[in-house]
Image: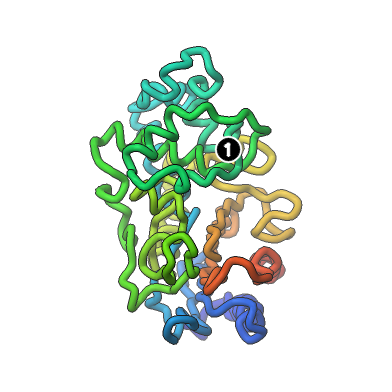
Amino acid sequence: MVDPSSPLLSPFDAGFDLLKEAVDAGRIPGGVFGMIDHNGHRLTRAIGHAQKVGGERPMTLDTWFDLASLTKVIFTTRKILELAVAGIIDLDSPVTTLIPDFRQYAPDCWERKVTFRQCLGHQTRFPAVEPIYTYGDDPDRLRAFVLQREWRDSEPAYSDINYILLGIALERLTGQRIREMDPGLGFAFHGDPAQTAATEFCTWRNRMICGEVHDENCYALQGSGHAGLFGTVDAVLDYAKSLLDSDKAGDPVVQLMRQPLSAKRTHGWERPYDGWSGGALCNDSVIGHTGFTGTGLWVDFDRGHAWTLLTNRVHPSRHVDSRIFALRAAIGDTINTH
């Protein structure tokens, strides 16, 4: 809900108008746009439909979203970095310190040398995409498949395999499956279908996906470190506010989140580069991340503000031109022009 006293009213309205244009044009069913300014003022507004196919429901500020790869930065990255700060893991040690059976039949292979830090920064040589769910439907067997497969040696790229491994490492350390862990305040690993934005009609599961994870690999693994988190706009903005507050307090976990590992990445997050999701006008203090379902979060530590765009752009199918990449960048530029 818009606070008319907020100094960010104009950029908020301008950013929301870009979302409205996309919804009105039929490129995206619906979405929620949210911001926090440097004084902690919160602005949120919803538009469009949470579901259009298989029943119609309006998008509201209480709508839950499948956050997709925001799981990586809201859940998995934080947990791994908290363990590192506590001295429980060494980020420069190989993941075999927690998963000793990883590629156990090839003791000298490159996979066994992959470190936690390399996984966080997507600096490994795992393939960008792998349809793990097509190899079976038993989650324990699929974990064994991930751990024992001879992975093709690819050029370093953003890869879900990195975070699937980090998730397995967390499971080994805690003795819990991901879905048994605390997802964080305001978050969950599932959504009430009546309150959750629908995603895609899945031709594999043969149903419209709503309230269960959209990502096929996460669904088949029955929980993973790379996807599966659900939340509302307020939950996402609460998390962003916690990062801003923790940064001011000198929290070493947030300092690691901000620490560059490459031209494009920090520990877990992206940082500004030519063509990135936050637009061309972000300063070097901004970190951000997106999710395949149409979600995104960006945090500007220098200016003390954050913004999130949550949409169901894959509903009812990913195979349309939603122009989500241009929309994200345009909203970021609008915010940072003011």
Residue 40 spot, x, y in % from top left: 46, 67
Q: Is residue 172 left or right of residue 217?
A: left
- Report the quarter where the N terminus lies: bottom left
Q: Residue at x 51, y 85 (%)?
A: 4
**In the picture, residue 97 is in which quadrant?**
top left
Q: Residue at x 31, y 46 (%)?
A: 178
Camera-side residue of 204 and 241: 204
Residue 310 spot, x, y in % from top left: 51, 69
Q: Is residue 151 above or below residue 302?
A: above
Q: Secondary structure at mark 1?
A: loop
What count of labels does the image hold? 1
Residue 194 appears in view:
yes
Camera-side residue of 99 and 185: 99
**In the picture, residue 319 is in which quadrant?**
bottom right
Residue 84 spot, x, y in % from top left: 39, 31
Which residue was labeled with disc 1? 122
Residue 85 spot, x, y in % from top left: 39, 32
**In the picture, residue 193 is in which quadrant?**
bottom left
Q: Residue at x 42, y 47 (%)?
A: 249
- Report the quarter where the C terminus lies: bottom right
Q: Residue at x 57, y 34 (%)?
A: 126
Camera-side residue of 177 and 46: 177
Q: Amino acid at mark 1?
A: His
Q: Is residue 176 left or right of residue 157?
A: left
Residue 304 appears in view:
no
